[in-house]
Each structure stands twice: as C-alpha cells, then as structure tokens.
Image (cartoon, rainbow, N blue to C red):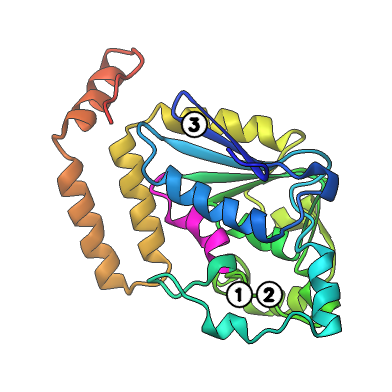
Amino acid sequence: MSDRLSVTVSGGVADVRLNRPDKMNALDDPMFEALVATGERLKTEPGLRAVVLSGEGRAFCAGLDTANFARMASGERSGDRLLTVDRTPRGANRAQNAVLVWRDLPVPVIAAVHGVALGGGFQLTLGPDLRFVAPDARLSILEIKWGLVPDMGGVALLRGLLRDDAARELTYSGRMISGEEALTLGLATRVCADPRAEALAFAAEIAGRSPDAVRAAKRLMNLAQDADEAAVLLAESKEQAALIGSPNQKEAVMSALEKRPARFVD
C-alpha cells in the first residue's frame, strides 16, 4: 500500500489499483516508484496466483503527468539522465521497469482498462499478460503529441501484439482508438462492459488451477517472445517433465475425475 497504489490480496488474487484519481492516475515519480516496488514485492507474495491491475476513478492512466512536459520544454528536465541511470539486469530503466515488472511476475497479470490509457498509461497496459478493455475506452500511443517516442518498453512489447505497419501508424500519428478497435487490432484481449469485474472473475478462475502449471505456462509464454524454436521446444519438455506426477498435477487429475474442487498447495 502507498499513496499511489492500493493492493488487496484475497483468495490468491492481488487487486492492484492506481490510486491518483484526481489526476486520472497520471504517472509521476512516486507512481513510478510505487509500480516498481509493488511489482517486486508481489514476486515473492506467498500464495499469489494472479494479479489484476486497474485504475481508481475515471481512468486507467492518463499517461505522464503534464508537469513533466512543462519541465522538458523549459529545459529544467533533460533526457541525458535516461542514458546514465542504473538499469535492471534485463536492461530496463525505472520507467521501463514499471511496465516490464508485471511481465516478470511469475503469475498472470490482467490489466483492466477503462476511461483512458494514453502514452505511458497505454504502455503500462502492455506489461500485463492480458488486457480487458471497456468498449468506450480511449487508448493512444500519444508520445508524438509531445515530440517524444514511447520509451517505457512499449516498442519492445508491441512487437508481439501488432503488425509492424499498424504499430508504426499508431506511433507516428498518436491516433486515439476505442476499446473495440483495440480488440480488432490485437491490443485488447477482451472488450468488457465492466473490465475490472471480469478481470477479477477471470483471475479467480486462474487461482483455481494448479499454480505449478500456471507458472510454468507463463515462463513458456515469456520465453516464446524471443527464443528460437529449438529453445522453446526443449523448454516445453522440461516444464512438462517437472509437472508430470507432481503433487499438484496428481491433484488436478483426481479432482477432475472425482468432480470436486481441487485443493492445490503452493
């Protein structure tokens, strides 16, 4: 819990909410710090099975706090620091890690998007595994409006979601798209009247599956983004070999055969 994020864990599901509704959850330094710290903490949360990331108030996230743009224009804030800051082992700076930390969590993460997800707020939707989006939500790779490029991992993450020309069109134009168009393009997983409610329900469904199998599946999906085919095929076999005959795999089989809720152990 912080003044920028609220976190509630129940039934193995972490309900994480951006909590700056008066600013439409705009990203400032404390918000970046809270996103990274919360993601890192949840990596070791006992019994965690899934995460839902959403925003309080009228929006998911309106992007970078406009005060930062004013400081850039005045010369008070320079871009030099982006090249000198410490980076994570995977090469991410703090702002990039605020997005990528959700991809690095060992359990599935679902972004529930309503209102707007603009610029950095749009990039924040890309770190989670899935995006449940309201039909009237407005999304944009808005950095071009401010004379900038997406630099919170957005370019790297878009590769697995959009055709190259579609990614270029949205990035060059800053065009606003609806939740419905996001689904058509592949940027939304589902369009939902109530994204957070559906995301929490889906997270609860995941929480009822074998945590060993879910975590193995996420490792494989993450690996498949960059590894060659031979590496992915070998990883599939290694993960499956570790699962077959394990206590939770046996429980998955027995509970299905006996038509009863499973009792998995973390």
Q: Which mark is residue 13?
A: 3
- Label 3, secondary structure: give it: strand
Q: CA distance from mark 3 to mark 2?
A: 30 Å
In the rendered structure, are the residues bearing label 3 and label 2 in contact, judged by CB atoms less than 8 Å apart? no
Based on the picture, tell me whether residue 3 belongs to the magenta stretch.
no
Mark 2 vs 1: CB contact within 8 A = yes
Q: Earlier in the sequence, mark 3 or mark 2?
A: 3
Relative placement, left or right, of 178 versus 110 is: right
Relative horizontal placement of residue 144, taking residue 186 as reference (left or right): right
Give the numbered dot on residue 150. Answer: 2
Image location (x, y in percent) of residue 196: 67, 35
Q: What residue sits right under mark 1 in the picture?
A: 155
Identity, as a three-letter code, of the amino acid under mark 1: Val
Tell me the quarter of the image containing the N terminus: top right
Q: Residues within 10 Å of mark 1 (few under 14, many from 20)?
A: some
Q: Which mark is residue 227?
A: none
The segment highlighted magenta reads: 96-107
Q: Residues within 10 Å of mark 2 (few under 14, many from 20)?
A: some
Toward which corner of the image does residue 155 lie, by quadrant? bottom right
